[in-house]
Image (cartoon, grey):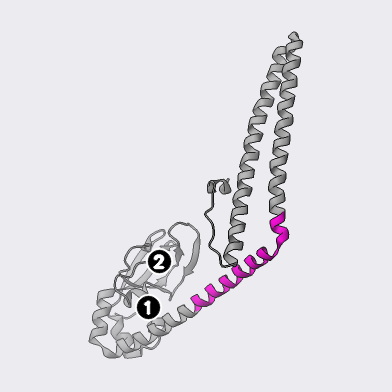
Amino acid sequence: MKLEIGLKEIPIFKYLDQTETEILGEAFEICEAKKGEKILTFGLPVQGLYILLEGEVGVFTEASDTQLAKIVRGGCVGEMSLLEDGQRSSAHIIVTTETARLLFCEQHRFDELLKSSASVALSFYRGAAELVSKRLRNTNEAISKQLDMAQKIMGEMSQNSHLSQFLGKTRSSIDNTGSNMVGQLLGIVLEIDKVAKRVESEQAHLGEIGQKLEALVLTESQNFDVISQQMDLIMQFFNNMRRVLKGEAPQEIKGDLKLLTR
Protein backbone atom coordinates (compact mmCIF):
# COMPACT_ATOMS: atom_id res chain seq x y z
CA MET A 1 0.00 0.00 0.00
CA LYS A 2 1.13 3.60 -0.56
CA LEU A 3 1.82 5.09 2.87
CA GLU A 4 0.54 8.51 3.93
CA ILE A 5 3.77 9.18 5.76
CA GLY A 6 7.38 8.48 4.80
CA LEU A 7 8.79 5.64 6.88
CA LYS A 8 12.15 7.39 6.80
CA GLU A 9 10.59 10.00 9.10
CA ILE A 10 10.47 7.28 11.77
CA PRO A 11 13.87 7.00 13.53
CA ILE A 12 13.91 3.20 13.54
CA PHE A 13 13.43 3.17 9.72
CA LYS A 14 15.78 6.05 8.85
CA TYR A 15 18.27 3.84 6.95
CA LEU A 16 15.74 2.27 4.57
CA ASP A 17 16.10 3.28 0.91
CA GLN A 18 13.16 3.92 -1.41
CA THR A 19 12.85 0.32 -2.58
CA GLU A 20 13.04 -1.03 0.98
CA THR A 21 10.42 1.51 2.11
CA GLU A 22 8.03 0.31 -0.60
CA ILE A 23 8.58 -3.33 0.42
CA LEU A 24 7.99 -2.52 4.06
CA GLY A 25 4.86 -0.51 3.23
CA GLU A 26 3.12 -3.73 2.18
CA ALA A 27 3.21 -4.95 5.79
CA PHE A 28 1.20 -2.00 7.16
CA GLU A 29 -2.54 -1.43 7.41
CA ILE A 30 -4.54 1.64 8.49
CA CYS A 31 -6.63 1.55 11.64
CA GLU A 32 -8.70 4.16 13.50
CA ALA A 33 -9.39 4.73 17.18
CA LYS A 34 -11.66 7.05 19.17
CA LYS A 35 -10.94 9.29 22.15
CA GLY A 36 -10.22 7.30 25.32
CA GLU A 37 -9.42 4.10 23.44
CA LYS A 38 -6.26 2.31 24.54
CA ILE A 39 -3.76 1.60 21.80
CA LEU A 40 -1.52 -0.23 24.26
CA THR A 41 -2.36 -1.40 27.78
CA PHE A 42 0.15 -1.49 30.62
CA GLY A 43 1.45 -4.99 31.29
CA LEU A 44 -0.22 -6.59 28.27
CA PRO A 45 1.68 -7.95 25.24
CA VAL A 46 2.43 -5.50 22.43
CA GLN A 47 1.11 -6.90 19.16
CA GLY A 48 3.19 -4.77 16.83
CA LEU A 49 4.16 -1.27 15.72
CA TYR A 50 1.79 1.73 15.54
CA ILE A 51 2.64 4.92 13.64
CA LEU A 52 0.40 7.94 14.19
CA LEU A 53 -1.00 9.58 11.05
CA GLU A 54 -3.63 11.93 12.53
CA GLY A 55 -4.62 13.00 16.03
CA GLU A 56 -2.68 12.57 19.26
CA VAL A 57 -2.16 9.85 21.85
CA GLY A 58 -0.98 10.24 25.44
CA VAL A 59 1.37 8.18 27.59
CA PHE A 60 -0.02 7.35 31.05
CA THR A 61 1.29 5.30 33.97
CA GLU A 62 -0.68 2.37 35.33
CA ALA A 63 -1.73 4.14 38.54
CA SER A 64 -2.21 7.76 37.45
CA ASP A 65 -4.42 9.83 35.19
CA THR A 66 -1.60 12.32 34.69
CA GLN A 67 -0.33 12.41 31.11
CA LEU A 68 3.44 11.89 31.03
CA ALA A 69 3.95 12.64 27.34
CA LYS A 70 2.08 13.01 24.08
CA ILE A 71 2.74 11.49 20.68
CA VAL A 72 1.84 13.35 17.50
CA ARG A 73 1.94 12.66 13.75
CA GLY A 74 4.97 10.62 12.82
CA GLY A 75 5.43 9.29 16.34
CA CYS A 76 5.37 5.57 16.92
CA VAL A 77 4.69 3.17 19.79
CA GLY A 78 5.35 -0.53 20.16
CA GLU A 79 8.49 -0.49 18.04
CA MET A 80 10.43 -2.55 20.59
CA SER A 81 8.02 -5.44 19.95
CA LEU A 82 9.72 -5.76 16.56
CA LEU A 83 12.98 -6.54 18.35
CA GLU A 84 11.84 -8.75 21.21
CA ASP A 85 9.17 -11.45 21.35
CA GLY A 86 6.69 -11.19 24.21
CA GLN A 87 7.32 -7.48 24.73
CA ARG A 88 4.82 -5.98 27.21
CA SER A 89 3.71 -2.37 27.34
CA SER A 90 5.36 -0.25 30.06
CA ALA A 91 2.50 2.30 29.99
CA HIS A 92 -1.05 2.96 28.81
CA ILE A 93 -1.15 4.61 25.36
CA ILE A 94 -4.52 6.33 25.04
CA VAL A 95 -6.11 8.42 22.29
CA THR A 96 -6.54 12.00 23.58
CA THR A 97 -8.15 13.62 20.51
CA GLU A 98 -11.62 12.90 19.13
CA THR A 99 -10.16 10.38 16.69
CA ALA A 100 -6.79 9.05 15.66
CA ARG A 101 -5.61 7.33 12.49
CA LEU A 102 -2.65 4.98 12.70
CA LEU A 103 -0.57 2.64 10.61
CA PHE A 104 -0.21 -0.79 12.18
CA CYS A 105 2.20 -3.60 11.43
CA GLU A 106 1.79 -6.93 13.22
CA GLN A 107 4.93 -8.39 14.71
CA HIS A 108 4.70 -11.72 12.88
CA ARG A 109 4.23 -9.98 9.49
CA PHE A 110 7.26 -7.84 10.15
CA ASP A 111 9.31 -10.90 11.12
CA GLU A 112 8.35 -12.61 7.86
CA LEU A 113 9.39 -9.51 5.93
CA LEU A 114 12.81 -9.39 7.60
CA LYS A 115 13.38 -13.06 6.81
CA SER A 116 12.46 -12.55 3.16
CA SER A 117 14.57 -9.42 2.55
CA ALA A 118 18.15 -9.22 3.84
CA SER A 119 18.51 -5.58 2.81
CA VAL A 120 15.39 -4.49 4.72
CA ALA A 121 16.57 -6.47 7.77
CA LEU A 122 20.04 -4.88 7.65
CA SER A 123 18.66 -1.32 7.37
CA PHE A 124 16.08 -1.94 10.10
CA TYR A 125 18.54 -3.42 12.61
CA ARG A 126 20.96 -0.57 12.00
CA GLY A 127 18.24 1.97 12.83
CA ALA A 128 17.07 -0.12 15.79
CA ALA A 129 20.59 -0.35 17.24
CA GLU A 130 21.00 3.41 16.98
CA LEU A 131 17.58 4.04 18.56
CA VAL A 132 18.23 1.70 21.50
CA SER A 133 21.68 3.19 22.03
CA LYS A 134 20.26 6.72 22.07
CA ARG A 135 17.52 5.76 24.52
CA LEU A 136 20.04 4.11 26.85
CA ARG A 137 22.21 7.23 26.82
CA ASN A 138 19.22 9.48 27.54
CA THR A 139 18.04 7.18 30.34
CA ASN A 140 21.49 7.01 31.90
CA GLU A 141 21.84 10.80 31.77
CA ALA A 142 18.41 11.31 33.36
CA ILE A 143 19.12 8.78 36.13
CA SER A 144 22.55 10.28 36.74
CA LYS A 145 21.08 13.78 37.13
CA GLN A 146 18.40 12.56 39.52
CA LEU A 147 20.96 10.68 41.63
CA ASP A 148 23.29 13.68 41.73
CA MET A 149 20.43 15.92 42.85
CA ALA A 150 19.24 13.45 45.49
CA GLN A 151 22.77 12.99 46.81
CA LYS A 152 23.30 16.73 47.00
CA ILE A 153 20.05 17.30 48.90
CA MET A 154 20.66 14.41 51.28
CA GLY A 155 24.24 15.55 51.83
CA GLU A 156 23.11 19.04 52.72
CA MET A 157 20.49 17.65 55.09
CA SER A 158 23.00 15.35 56.74
CA GLN A 159 25.54 18.13 57.24
CA ASN A 160 22.95 20.52 58.58
CA SER A 161 22.90 19.57 62.24
CA HIS A 162 20.62 22.55 62.91
CA LEU A 163 17.82 20.79 60.99
CA SER A 164 18.12 17.69 63.15
CA GLN A 165 18.13 19.81 66.31
CA PHE A 166 15.15 21.80 65.04
CA LEU A 167 13.11 18.65 64.36
CA GLY A 168 13.92 17.31 67.81
CA LYS A 169 13.06 20.57 69.57
CA THR A 170 9.86 20.95 67.55
CA ARG A 171 8.66 17.51 68.53
CA SER A 172 9.53 18.14 72.19
CA SER A 173 7.75 21.51 72.08
CA ILE A 174 4.63 19.95 70.57
CA ASP A 175 4.55 17.24 73.22
CA ASN A 176 5.01 19.76 76.06
CA THR A 177 2.46 22.20 74.62
CA GLY A 178 -0.09 19.45 74.20
CA SER A 179 0.42 18.10 77.71
CA ASN A 180 0.27 21.58 79.27
CA MET A 181 -2.87 22.61 77.37
CA VAL A 182 -4.71 19.38 78.09
CA GLY A 183 -3.67 19.52 81.74
CA GLN A 184 -4.94 23.08 82.13
CA LEU A 185 -8.22 22.27 80.43
CA LEU A 186 -8.74 19.31 82.74
CA GLY A 187 -8.07 21.61 85.71
CA ILE A 188 -10.74 24.01 84.48
CA VAL A 189 -13.22 21.13 84.12
CA LEU A 190 -12.60 20.13 87.78
CA GLU A 191 -13.09 23.72 89.00
CA ILE A 192 -16.36 24.01 87.08
CA ASP A 193 -17.54 20.77 88.68
CA LYS A 194 -16.79 22.18 92.16
CA VAL A 195 -18.68 25.41 91.44
CA ALA A 196 -21.64 23.48 90.04
CA LYS A 197 -21.94 21.52 93.28
CA ARG A 198 -21.98 24.76 95.37
CA VAL A 199 -24.35 26.74 93.14
CA GLU A 200 -27.44 24.61 92.67
CA SER A 201 -29.22 27.09 90.37
CA GLU A 202 -26.33 26.99 87.87
CA GLN A 203 -25.68 23.25 87.97
CA ALA A 204 -27.27 22.49 84.58
CA HIS A 205 -25.55 25.38 82.81
CA LEU A 206 -22.15 24.71 84.34
CA GLY A 207 -22.54 20.99 83.65
CA GLU A 208 -23.10 21.78 79.98
CA ILE A 209 -19.97 23.97 79.89
CA GLY A 210 -18.02 21.19 81.61
CA GLN A 211 -19.13 18.64 79.00
CA LYS A 212 -18.07 20.92 76.15
CA LEU A 213 -14.67 21.41 77.74
CA GLU A 214 -14.28 17.67 78.26
CA ALA A 215 -15.05 17.11 74.57
CA LEU A 216 -12.48 19.79 73.69
CA VAL A 217 -9.89 18.11 75.93
CA LEU A 218 -10.48 14.77 74.20
CA THR A 219 -10.29 16.27 70.68
CA GLU A 220 -7.16 18.32 71.32
CA SER A 221 -5.37 15.51 73.12
CA GLN A 222 -6.01 13.27 70.11
CA ASN A 223 -4.80 15.99 67.70
CA PHE A 224 -1.59 16.54 69.65
CA ASP A 225 -1.04 12.79 69.79
CA VAL A 226 -1.35 12.53 66.00
CA ILE A 227 1.03 15.47 65.43
CA SER A 228 3.54 13.95 67.84
CA GLN A 229 3.39 10.61 65.97
CA GLN A 230 3.82 12.42 62.63
CA MET A 231 6.93 14.19 63.92
CA ASP A 232 8.29 10.88 65.17
CA LEU A 233 7.87 9.34 61.69
CA ILE A 234 9.61 12.34 60.08
CA MET A 235 12.50 11.97 62.52
CA GLN A 236 12.82 8.28 61.62
CA PHE A 237 12.93 9.06 57.89
CA PHE A 238 15.53 11.77 58.46
CA ASN A 239 17.70 9.49 60.58
CA ASN A 240 17.50 6.79 57.90
CA MET A 241 18.77 9.25 55.28
CA ARG A 242 21.74 10.00 57.50
CA ARG A 243 22.41 6.29 57.95
CA VAL A 244 22.31 5.64 54.19
CA LEU A 245 24.77 8.48 53.54
CA LYS A 246 27.14 6.92 56.06
CA GLY A 247 26.88 3.57 54.30
CA GLU A 248 24.72 2.02 57.02
CA ALA A 249 21.52 0.07 56.49
CA PRO A 250 18.28 2.00 57.10
CA GLN A 251 16.20 0.97 60.08
CA GLU A 252 12.60 -0.19 59.89
CA ILE A 253 10.15 2.69 60.19
CA LYS A 254 7.97 2.12 63.24
CA GLY A 255 4.53 3.68 63.36
CA ASP A 256 1.46 4.22 61.20
CA LEU A 257 2.69 5.65 57.87
CA LYS A 258 -0.90 6.58 56.97
CA LEU A 259 -0.60 9.45 59.45
CA LEU A 260 1.67 11.28 56.98
CA THR A 261 -1.17 11.46 54.44
CA ARG A 262 -3.61 13.14 56.84
Q: Is the magenta region chiefly helix, strand or loop?
A: helix
Picture residue at 69% right of the left edge, 42% below the top: 175
Q: Quadrant of residue 187?
A: top right
Q: Amino acid at mark 1?
A: Glu
- Circle 2: residue type: Ser
Horizontal side, residue 160 vs residue 12: left or right: right
Q: Is residue 222 visible?
A: yes
Q: Nearer the viewer, residue 184 or 20?
A: 184
Q: Tell me the magenta residue range.
A: 138-165
> Is 243 situated above or below 78?
above
257 in relation to 162, above or below: above
Where is mark 1, residue-wise? 4
At a point 45% along the width and 61% down the height, the residue shown is 61
- From what the image shows, is residue 55 above or below residue 24? above
- Give the secondary structure at mark 2: loop
Where is mark 2, residue-wise?
90
**Residue 52 at what x, y percent from top left?**
40, 72
**Nearest to viewer (mark 1 / mark 2):** 2
Instruction: Tell me which numbered mark, 1 or 2, is placed earlier along the sequence.
Output: 1
Residue 147: say if magenta. yes
Secondary structure of the residue carrying tag 1 is loop
In the image, 62: left or right of 112? right
What is the residue that sits farthest to the top in this orientation?
200
Image spot of residue 5 (x, y percent) = 39, 79
Label 1 neighbour load within 10 Å: few <14, some 14-19, many 20+ = few
Check the picture and name the quadrant holding the N terminus. Answer: bottom left
Query: Looking at the figure, which quarter contains the C terminus?
Result: top right
Query: Residue drawn at (66%, 22%), measured in percent from left and top?
Result: 211
Asked where in the image residue 30 lies, by quadrant, the reply is bottom left
